[in-house]
Image (tube, rainbow, N blue to C red):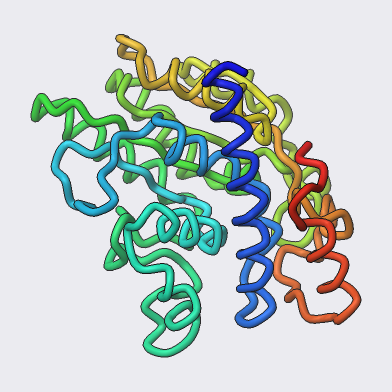
Amino acid sequence: MSDALVQIDQLKAVARRIRREIAEISIVTGGHIASSYSCLEILLALYQAGVMRVRPHQPDWPQRDRFILSKGHAETALYVVLADLGFFPCEWLSAYYRAGDHRLGGHPDRSIPGVEMTTGALGHGLGVAAGLALAARMDGQPQRHYVLMGDAECAEGSIWEAGMFAAQHQLGNLIGIVDRNRIGASDFTDNFIGLGSLVDKWRAFGWETEVCDGHDFAALIRRLRYAAQRETTTPFMLIAETVKGKGVSFMENDPMWHVKRLADADEIRQAREELADGGDDE
């Protein structure tokens, strides 16, 4: 088996383990479990597949790439990924996530090691990332700047203002990702905002744009590495087609799981069974 295939198998195993951890955390504290599941492979491709340059034990390393979770309600996934890499102790997840001194709050806060921006109010992440990218270019710095948005978040006008700004200022060091799970806070996006073809829209706004399966590690890594290695002045947007609640059958594509807590005994048992080792990774 090639090294690439080994890496993909390892990432699948990590994703399954982290989904179990997110489920157990949700049982105790709540959280946006379905939103965290939809973007987990994206986060792992960025942080554990060598796409982003980071140093977990030196979170403020000046040459690091920057990542902004604009859809801050997926904080559970980000916290577990950061803890898994050693940005902060794993014990924080049980002691401080929505508990104790709430060091790990219900949305990411920039006081947390590895978190670049306090997020939660949608529509701001891309604009901040664009500003950081422009500043880095003006200072001759090599960092790449990544921002992960929700698709319902793309209803915000500030997203498109930032998109025009990035194209105008030729921010080739800016890489956006849309978690295209087609569900907002309480309904399917098609029922409340006509997003249409996000690929066509972003291209019309001057971005190089591609689309891929947001749960396919090979596809994600290939496109994100390509985006990181480009020598261009054109910003890059990846539309990642995902499933909200991915990994637990009764959560998948069900809008009610945006905020619902995993508390029912039968649902807890079923979720644990479906996320157990040896299950179907696809």
Q: Nearer the viewer, residue 91 or 250?
A: 91
Among the 4 quarters of the image, the one containing residue 197: top right
Q: Residue at x 43, y 19 (%)?
A: 227
Q: Residue at x 36, y 62 (%)?
A: 118
Q: Outermost residue, left direction? A: 139
Q: Nearer the viewer, residue 245 or 22?
A: 22
Q: Residue at x 81, y 64 (%)?
A: 271
Q: Outermost residue, front direction? A: 1
Q: Residue 4 placed where, x, y %?
A: 54, 20
Q: Outermost residue, bottom direction? A: 100
Q: Residue 51 placed where, x, y %?
A: 40, 29
Query: Does the rendering let one see residue 155?
Result: no
Q: Residue at x 44, y 75 (%)?
A: 105
In the image, residue 23 above or below residue 274: below
Among the 4 quarters of the image, the one containing residue 215: top right
Among the 4 quarters of the image, the one containing residue 174: top left
Query: Does the rendering let one see residue 274?
Result: yes
Q: Residue 146 placed where, x, y %?
A: 39, 36
In the image, residue 72 above or below residue 229: below
Q: Residue 5 placed where, x, y %?
A: 60, 23
Number of labels in the image equals: 0
Left or right: 221 with respect to 251? left
- Quadrant occupied by the C terminus: top right
- Quadrant occupied by the N terminus: top right
Left or right: 214 with respect to 205? right
Q: Nearer the viewer, residue 259 or 50?
A: 50
